[in-house]
Image (cartoon, rainbow, N blue to C red):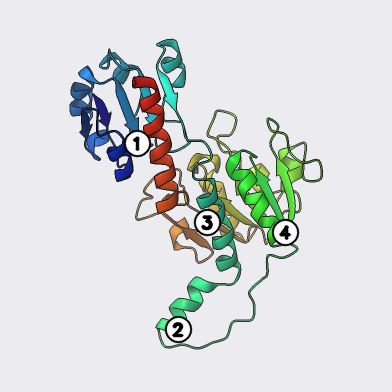
């Protein structure tokens, strides 16, 4: 049996139709029920809410493979999977184009104040804002040069942005490469985060590192909310030590109604959807389904 505990594109169900499937997109929130149904599972498909930990694995004695509908692995204890010989299917790069298009699209809209202008016209206004900025010639700091960071950099080139990249673990083109986090941030007009959440990247942008950025800089986070110390981000924005932020991910998701960042006009927040397009979800579902078929036969 294959258990699917979170929402999946129908194409995966079609591809796996020859197997016994237990599909409940809300099963992740019913921990007891999830643990019970796993007793016969040979495969498990999750997104980012199902916690694949020691407790779960103890209730899944026949589990052979876990498929992750996305690329972040902070909800999966990968060391435990490896120790038990359970394979992990991760569709790395499958949503890179979707995220990259979000980053550049949101940046252009943000710099041109398009959201406020749309709202203004809907309210009967017709004030022609001349204070918007082009992204041509601006310096973009890309932190993380995996598939998504590369997709962002490639598309930024088409807009003639100046590129800087920091990733000590990747082969970065020499003309873009920087050797330290401080170097990539210094003088950057825009920062885009594309690294996984680890002990070393937790609060990568904090009081010290945010202070390196120019006061007009825009921070974009489509990776993991915990990469930014949001209390320090709020302080920098409130003190006008930073130009703005585009946040698709948050330290707490969803943010509380009292969240102060949501009250700032120069903060745009979306509900963790940068990588969620019809195209990316089809690609991800196909990759994961094919991976499970390869393991389970």
Instruction: Report if the CB atoms under discs 2 and 4 are less than 8 Å apart.
Output: no
Residue that badge 3 annotates: 102
Please tell me which residue lies in front, 256 or 293.
293
Which is closer to the viewer, label 1 or label 3?
3
The residue located at (66%, 58%) in the rendering is: 217
Instruction: Find residue 82 and report its horizontal and vertical position in percent.
Output: 45, 15
Q: Secondary structure at mark 1?
A: loop
Q: Is residue 7 above or below residue 84?
A: below
Give the alpha-carbon distance from disc 2 to disc 3, as whole Å.
24 Å
Mark 2 or 4: the one toward you: 4
> In the rendered view, would you say 4 is above or below 135?
above
Packing grade of label 2 (10 A; few <14, some 14-19, many >=20) is: few
Disc 3 residue crowd, few under 14, some 14–19, many 20+, Cα 10 Å: some
What is the number of the mark on residue 161? 4
Q: Are marks 1 and 3 in contact (CB under 8 Å)?
A: no
The mark that comes first in sequence, 3 or 4, is 3
């Amino acid at each position: 049996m294959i258990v699917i505990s979170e929402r999946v594109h129908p194409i995966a169900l079609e591809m796996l139709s020859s197997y016994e499937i237990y599909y409940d997109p809300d099963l992740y929130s019913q921990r007891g029920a999830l643990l019970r149904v796993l007793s016969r599972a040979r495969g498990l498909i999750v997104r980012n809410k199902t916690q694949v930990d020691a407790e779960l694995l103890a209730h899944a004695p026949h589990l052979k493979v876990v498929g992750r509908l996305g690329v972040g692995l902070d909800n999966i204890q990968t060391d435990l999977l490896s120790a038990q010989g359970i394979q992990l299917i991760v569709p790395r790069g499958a949503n890179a184009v979707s995220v990259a298009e979000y980053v550049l699209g949101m940046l252009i809209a943000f710099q041109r104040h398009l959201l406020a202008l749309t709202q203004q016209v809907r309210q009967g206004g017709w004030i022609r804002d001349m204070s918007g900025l082009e992204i041509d010639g601006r310096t973009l700091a890309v932190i993380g040069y995996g598939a998504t960071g590369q997709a962002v950099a490639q598309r930024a080139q088409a807009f003639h942005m100046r590129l800087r990249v920091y990733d000590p673990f990747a082969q970065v083109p020499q003309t873009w490469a920087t050797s330290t986090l401080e170097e990539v941030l210094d003088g950057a007009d825009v920062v885009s985060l594309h690294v996984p959440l680890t002990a070393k990247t937790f609060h990568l942008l904090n009081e010290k590192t945010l202070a390196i950025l120019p006061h007009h800089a825009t921070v974009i986070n489509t990776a993991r909310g915990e990469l930014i110390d949001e209390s320090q981000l709020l302080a920098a924005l409130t003190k006008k030590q930073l130009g703005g932020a585009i946040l698709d991910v948050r330290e707490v998701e969803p943010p509380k109604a009292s969240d102060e960042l949501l009250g700032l006009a120069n903060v745009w927040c979306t509900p963790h959807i940068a990588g969620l397009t019809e195209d990316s979800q089809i690609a991800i579902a196909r990759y994961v389904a094919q991976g499970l078929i390869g393991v389970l036969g």
